[in-house]
Image: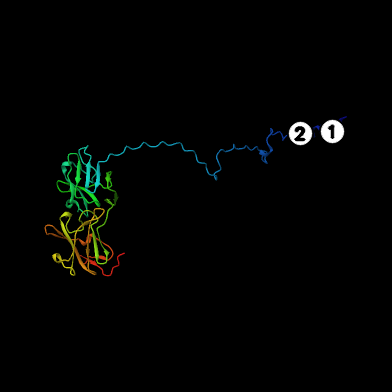
Amino acid sequence: MGRKISLSAIAIMISATFFLCACGGGGGGSDPQNVTDRGESVQEEPASTEPPSDQPVPDQPTPPQEDPPSEPSEKFDVSIALSEAGHAVTFDLSSGAVKGFISDVPIYPQDVKAVAFSSARVDWGLDSTAFGQIDANGVATIEGAANNDKGNWCLVLMDNSVIWFDIEGNYSISGLPWEIVGDQIVYGGFREAKIELVAPGKARVHFGSNLLSGLMETGIDPSGVLSARWNSNKVGWGESSTAISTLQVDENKDLFFTVDIPSADLGNFSLVLSDGTVVWFDVEAWICGSGVTVRHDIGQIEFVSEIVVE
């Protein structure tokens, strides 16, 4: 009887041990994959919502931006109308002063002797032959300007000081075509004064505008010119010259003349005025075409022989 009880107890103990192993050793139902070799439970980290560091971050939508308020248009202090007859410069005198100039002090109409345009064709500053005065309406009509030119405007003050226009300022310019090149305005389709051969033995002298420029004097009235002539040892000098011509006007209203020139000649051109005055060319002011060159060493113009005019 005692032997049977001992075997039964042993059987019960073996069955209990097998049941505990099957249930994970009483560990509370943990996942076997989260148990270390020391029987410790490992807690999983929550899944990250951030992308891996080696992956590009998608662009975030940009909230719509409102356009900045537009600046009110600036009022022009000076407006300039260009024409073949001259320039009309209108000043805004609402503040009492004239504006748009390179000056650190206010300038008032009563301070201004003249408004002038300055260039190689009309001369510079106080010597300019293209000028006008400011009237009661703030308008200065500049007469004597060329139908095309390059230069800048200025104020000539009562003390003869010169105040230049700020050429890069906010001016309203209209009329003839124009552009700002460097520190000058170029208008009217600027054409250079040029001396060239237009046929064997025939020279053409083109003044580039409706003004007589490139001379030793400025402000010569074209209507007062009697003749134009070539002077050299071959054709004679002054009144003895046999190479004589008269002024003409081309389709652009530019002044020019043509004259017969001996081959390989050296000399200079001159204009004879109605009062007998002779005005010589400033050879340094001219551009020379094919077959013509300026002899800077002696201040004369040279025509080269056997030039083929294309």
Q: Which residue lies furthest to the top in this view?
A: 1
Q: What residue type is labelled 1?
A: Leu
Q: Which mark is residue 7?
A: 1
Residue 202 location (% of width, % of height): 24, 65
Q: Distance between the residues labelled 2 and 1?
A: 19 Å
Examine the rendered structure and indicate whether residue 33 appears above or below residue 267.
above
In terms of depth relative to the viewer, which is nearer, 49 or 76?
76
Q: Are marks 2 and 1 in contact (CB under 8 Å)?
A: no
Q: Residue at x 82, y 33 (%)?
A: 11
Question: Label 2's element?
Answer: helix
Among numbered discs 2 and 1, the one appearing first in the sequence: 1
Q: Quadrant of residue 171?
A: top left
In terms of depth relative to the viewer, which is nearer, 159 or 230?
230
Residue 120 location (% of width, % of height): 22, 55
Residue 81 visible, this orientation: yes
In terms of depth relative to the viewer, which is nearer, 202 or 82?
202
In terms of depth relative to the viewer, which is nearer, 301 or 180?
301
Q: What residue type is labelled 2?
A: Phe
Residue placed under numbered mark 2 in the picture: 19
Callout 1: 10 Å neighbours few (<14), some, many (20+)?
Answer: few
Colour scheme employed for the rendering of this structure? rainbow
Horizontal side of 291 relative to 270 (left or right) equals right
Question: Label 1's element?
Answer: helix
Residue 63 location (% of width, % of height): 46, 36
User: Which of label 2 and label 1 is nearer to you?
Assistant: 2
Residue 266 location (% of width, % of height): 21, 68
The N terminus sits in image quarter: top right
Q: Residue 102 carries which label?
A: none
Q: Quadrant of residue 233?
A: bottom left
Q: Residue at x 26, y 65 (%)?
A: 292
